[in-house]
Image: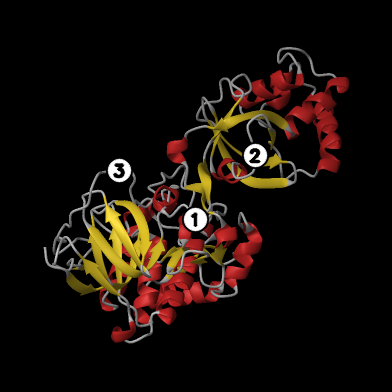
Amino acid sequence: MATTTTECIDLAIIGGGPAGLAAAISAARAGAHPVVIEARDRLAETIRPTGDGRCNISNSHVTAWDYHNADFVRRAFLSCRPKQVRAFLEGCGIMLREEAQGRLYPQPNKSTAVIEALLAAARRADVKSRTGKRVRFLRRNADVWTISFEDGSRLRARSVIVCTGGGLAGEFVPHVVSVEPARPVLAPLACDGRAVRGLDKIRVKCALTWEDVVEEGEITFRSYGISGICAFNISRFVEPGQTVHVDFAPALDRSTGPVFLHQRLDSLEPRTWREFTTGMLLPPVAAAVFRAAGIQEASRPRRGDLAAFEEAWRAFPLTVRGIGDARLAQVRRGGIAVSCIDPRTMAVKDAPGLHAAGEAVDVDGPCGGYNLHWAWASGIIAGHAVAQGASSSPSERPRCIDRENPSAPKHVRISEGHACEEAVPEKDGGRSPHGGEEDSSAQDDGAGA
């Protein structure tokens, strides 16, 4: 077959979620010509369930120290400060409003509004896409990256930005790139069964503590352990076998707790411990506290038992066994090691032309818009960096030689998230289960990532 020379595309972005779209829009606005590759049939679908369908899009209180690998994030944020992320979102047409704890939401209060605005911004920037394409592997040859897909087709690009979630980046990036194993975080916690017996589906306002980490808010007891935003955030730190503690009265100062209990005992003169806690704790919660304190709920309260009760009430112990339901995890910790990435550009070291952003990088934050903020910021950084490095004239760019298919692959213009034109497949040997799909982390109790 005759050899045909075709021009490589400027930029391939693997993953059409928030980081991928931020990278594509930023790169296109700066003069590059990105093509977004997405395993799903539509772009931006991973945004749809965020924030319980409302899309907690960012947080006005964000700092680098809120994140795993904080020093790396601090250096990255020097290239894209929080106000630049907000300007990017508003520049895409997204009107923002702020709720408690700095949580930012779109004014329409629907994730679909964010999706529609991003896709419209991508169309205006002439971003193209190829959907329904699962990546099999990446290979660099003669200063050009070849992306091989599971359907046997291929695409060549001078630069690639990996924006896949769920730990998928490690399945197809070159072996020279160090990858941290993926594991679910921001998820419910499985705990010792005896401690949570009889508490399934009960919600309580409390403070959840692990060592010096304190999360105040609400938890929901499950048959396997605890859920809710507090539990999700603590799941980023605690390991199986360690103990978290629940304070069922976080507004009560510790120093005044004993006085409060003695005064309550004197004023109520209760005949049983259950009567003592009526109006103070829900009966199933009180029963769990009594078990932890070694108290019989039908017995008469004595002053000598108040200290044991207070300890169980203010520091109810739960031994963690691990993640309770990985399907509900909002993010996966892991991905390309930060030691391999230049935080100023999100460029992967020892892999020229390769960048990474979003959950493809070993960075994660708490609930409240922090993980979406990282996706926007890192995507913006990577997109700008590639565009600045892709400013050479077409004659100076490397050329691709396709020995198996003389036709250049078609690319599709974004139209309401659907592909308008199918790409022409190219032959490639073998198939692999590996893909390039953005993570579809489930939400729980409205916790925004």
Would you name the residue on which mark 2 appears? 238
Disc 1 crowd rating (10 Å Cα; few below 14, some 14-19, many 20+) is: few
Distance between the Cα atoms at labels 1 and 2?
31 Å
Q: Residue at position x 15%, y 62% from top? A: 405
For the residues carrying marks 1 and 3, which lies nearer the camera in this image?
A: 1
Would you name the residue on which mark 1 appears? 176
Query: Pointers 1 and 2 in contact (CB under 8 A)?
Result: no
Of labels 1 and 3, earlier in sequence is 1
The amino acid marked with disc number 2 is Val
Which percent across, then down, holds residue 406? 14, 67
The amino acid marked with disc number 1 is Val
Q: Secondary structure at mark 3?
A: loop
Would you name the residue on which mark 3 appears? 432
Outermost residue to the left: 1
Q: Secondary structure at mark 1?
A: loop
The amino acid marked with disc number 3 is Ser
From what the image shows, is residue 234 above or below residue 316?
A: below
Query: Pointers 1 and 3 in contact (CB under 8 A)?
Result: no
Disc 3 crowd rating (10 Å Cα; few below 14, some 14-19, many 20+) is: few
Which percent across, then down, holds residue 311? 79, 30
Q: Residue at position x 53%, y 53% from top? A: 178
Q: Secondary structure at mark 2?
A: loop
Q: Nearer the viewer, residue 389 or 140?
A: 140
Distance between the Cα atoms at labels 3 and 2?
35 Å
Q: Is residue 276 left or right of residue 56?
A: right
Quadrant for residue 4, please give it. bottom left
Regarding residue 4, the answer to whether it shows in the image is yes
Which percent across, then down, holds residue 105? 45, 63
Distance between the Cα atoms at labels 1 and 3?
20 Å
